[in-house]
Amino acid sequence: MSSVFQASVILCLTLCVAQGVEFTPAPQRFQQEVALYFTEQDGSPSGPIQLIEAGADGVIRSFASGQWYEFHAGHWSVNKTLKAQSDSQFVFADSHGKALQANIPWREVTQLLRSGITNWVIGSNRCLVVTEGGVISTITWPKELMIHQMALSPDNILHAASSDGLLAFDANAWRPVEVRDGLGRAWAVGQVLGVAFDAHGRLWFASKAGVGCHTTEGWRFYEGKDGLPWNDFTGIAASANGDVWFSTHLGVIRFDGKEWQYRQGRCWLPNDDVSQAIVDAEGNAWFATAAGLGCIERRSMTLAEKAEFYEGEIERFVKRTPFGYVAEASLRRAGDKSSADPQDSDNDGLWTSMYGAGECFAYAATGDPKAKERARKAFEALRFLQKVTQGCEHAPPKGYIARTIRPAEWPDPNTGRLEGDRENQQGDKLWKVYEPRWPKSADGKWYWKSDTSSDELDGHYFFYPLYYDFCADTDAERERVREVVRDITDHLITHGFVLIDHDGKPTRWGVYGPQYLNRDPRWWPERGLKSLSMLSYLAVAEHITGDAKYGAASRELIDREGYAHNAMYPKVQNGPGSGNQSDDEMAFMCFYSLLKYSKDEALKNMIRWSFYQYWVNEAPEMNPFFNFAYAAQNVDAASSSVWGSLAVKPWPGWHEDAMATLYGFPLDRLNWSFHNSHRLDVLFLPRVRSGDLASPDQPHQRGYLVSGKVLPVENRHFNHWNTDPWQLDYGGSGDELAAGTVFLLPYYMGLYHGFIEKPAR
C-alpha cells in the first residue's frame, strides 16, 4: 500500500492521559430541569391564568376567573376566603395569608408587587398602594400610558416598564430613566415590556430592541447576536440565585449570567403564551399561561439517576416482543405513557444494537449485573434476527440478518406493500420491488423484514465486539458470539461483499463490493462510507474469531481495490450541516471499531486522519456519542505524513459540549413539537451547506446559534442520533415515546473511557 500516511501513530493509551490535562472527568451531580403541568385533576384552573405569585408565607398562589388557588402538597385548591364580593373589587392575601381588599375591578389587575407590609396592586393604567393595616392610596399615573410591569429597587424606588419607556417614581413624579449604549443609541424608550431588579440589586429592562442590565460598570445590552433568543416579552422575574427569567408570548427565557436558555413547547410549558413568571425560594420557576399553570423545577440529580430513569422507561414502555427490541413506542393517548403500544420500526436491529452497546459499556464501567443482563438480552434479540431467517420458505443464504420481526398474529405487513415499493422506485431507481418483503419464519410465529440495510450491519458489528469483550464470560457464550459474527462475515465475503436477500439479489443498501463501489457510477456517493464499514467489519471479525482470513480479506481490499483511500473521504459534504446525517451515526460506530480492533497500524494511521476530518465537521453538533467515540481513540493522538506529525486530538471544548448535552437532555422523551426558526439568536445555513445538494434546503429551515453550534438538546426532539441537529422546527404531538438510548450510550461510553466520574456505590 502506498500512501502519504504510512508512519506509526503516536497514541498514548494510558488511563492517566484519559484523565489528563485535556479534561477533568465530569461530575455526576447536576441540576436537572423538570417541567410540571397542572390540570383540573390537580385542582388547578385549566384556562388562562391572570396572576401568579409566591407569597411571603411561602405559598404559591394563582388567580384565574376571579378566584385564588393555592398550592399545597402537590395539589391546588380554591381559597374561598379570598373571594371578592363584587366584580369591582380585588381581594388578595397579605403576608400572613389573610384577606386584603383593593377598590379595583379584579379583571383589571395585572400584577401584585410587595415589600414588607406594603402592597402595590397594578392594573394596565393605574397603581394602588394597600398596606396591611388597610390603608389604600393611589400612585399618580398618566392615564394615557400603559403599565406593562413594575418593580421596586433595593432603595425602594418604584420603576415602571411602560408604553412610553422605562420610568422611575422619584419625589412623587415619574421621570424617564435614560439608557444609552456606547454607540449613542437610546434604549428603553417607547414600549418597554418588562422591568425587574435581580438578586444583586441590578436593574433589568426588556424591550423589542433587546434586554439591558445596569451593572457596576454601566449598562450591558443583549440582542440576538449576544444570544438573546426572543423579544416579545411580557415580563421579567428574578430569582434569589441570580438567574433572571423572561416571560414572552412564545415561551420563556432564563439567563444565568453566562448563557441564554430558551424553553418553548409542550415539553416545557402548558402553553407558549406566558403572561407572567415568578421564582420561588427554591429556585423553581412558575408560569401563568394561556392554558393553565406550569412550573420548571431544578432538581439535584446524578447522571446515574438520570440513566436509571431512562432505563426504567425502556423496560416499562418501549421494549417489544419477548426478545426486548428497543426503538420507540407509539402512544394510544397523547402524553399518556401508560398507553404505550410499541410497534416494529424499520431499524430495530440498529437501535437495539446501540442500546445493547450502551449496556456493555455500563457493565464494563460499573460491574452492574443488571447492565450485563440487559446486554445479554440484547445479544439474544440480535442473534435471533439472524436465526429467524433460516429454514423458511423464503430463506436467504446463511448469515443473513433481518431488519426486525413482528408477531404472525399481527396484520400481514405484506398487504399493499408491493404498490408502495413501486412508488418508492419512482424516486429511487435502485429500490427493490419484490415479494414478500416480510417472509414468515419456519415455525410460523414471526414475520421478519428483509431488504436489510447497511446501517443495520453497522449496528450489529458495533455491538458484538463490545459484548464479546465485556460480557461474554464463558467459552460457550463467546462461541455463540463467534458463530454469529463468522456467519454474517462469511456471507458477505462469499457473495462478493454484498448482502444477498432471499430473492438472490443484493439488498438495496447492503452493497460493499468493489464491483459496485469502484466501478458502478451509481454508487460513488457511498464509496467512502461503505469502504470504511467493510474494513471495520473485517477487523471485528478477526478480533472475535481469531481467524486471520478476515485480516487477509481486508488487506486484499486495501491493496487491490483502494478501500483505505476510499475511507479517507467517507462523507459527501460541504461543511458543517451538510451531507446525510444518518451516515454520521454509522461512520462513528465504524471508526470506533476499526481503530479499536484493527491490527493494521498503517491503516489505522490513515483512518485516524480520516476520523479527525470527519469529527471536525461534526464538532458543532455537541453530540456526546460522537465526541466520546472520537476522543476514546484520539484523545492525545497524532498521525504522521510526509509533512511530519499532525495532531488529531479533539479541539478544546469537546468535553464541555458533550456534557452540556448529557446534562441538558429533558427527562420527557415524548415527541412534543419545538419551534426555533423565529429566534433572534439563530443564523440560517447557506444553500451550499444543505443536507443534500440535489435537494437544497428550504429557506429558514435549517440553522444554528450565533455561537456556531446547533440548538441545545433542550430545544429539540429526536429519537436517535441520525436526526438532523441543524433542523430548527420539529413537529410532534406527544403521541410517541422515544427511548433514552441517545443518552445511555454516550453516558456509559463516557464512564468506561474515564470522561465522566464513576458513580458512588
Image: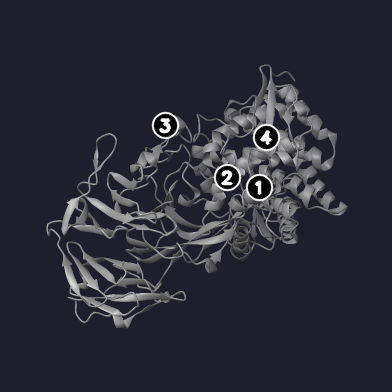
- Are there few (<14), some (14-19), or many (20+) residues within 10 Å of tag 1? many
Alpha-carbon span between mark 3 and mark 1 = 35 Å
Q: Nearer the viewer, mark 4 or mark 3?
A: 4
Q: Is residue 453 visible?
A: no
Q: Which mark is residue 677?
A: none
Task: Work out how far the residue at label 2 is from the one at label 4, CA to CA, in angstroms.
Answer: 16 Å
Asked whether 632 or 282 is in front, the reply is 282
Mark 3 surroundings: few (<14), some (14-19) or many (≥20) residues within 10 A:
some
Q: Residue at x 80, y 38 (%)?
A: 542
Tag 3 residue: 687
Measure the alpha-carbon separation of dots 2 and 3.
Answer: 28 Å
Discs 1, 2 touching: Cβ within 8 Å: yes
Q: Looking at the image, what colour scheme do you see? A: one colour
**Label 3 vs label 1, nearer the camera:** 1
Q: Earlier in the sequence, mark 1 or mark 2?
A: 2
In the rendered view, tell whether residue 721 sits above or below residue 5: below
In the picture, measured across the screen, residue 191 lies left or right of residue 690, that is left
What amino acid is labelled 2 in the image?
Answer: Ala
At horizontal 21% and vertical 82% (from top left) the residue drawn is: 85
Can you identify the residue that label 1 sits on? Answer: 750
Q: Which mark is residue 634?
A: 4
- Residue at 67% in and 48% down: 749
The x and y percentages for residue 297 are: 47, 62
**Distance of label 4 from label 3 (alpha carbons):** 32 Å
Mark 2 / mark 3, whichever is N-terminal: 2
Residue 103 versus residue 284 in the image, above or below: below
What residue is disc 2 on? 658
Verify CB contact (< 8 Å) between mark 1 and mark 4.
Answer: no
Element at label 1: helix
- Counting residues from the start of the chain, the first of labels 1 and 4 encountered is 4
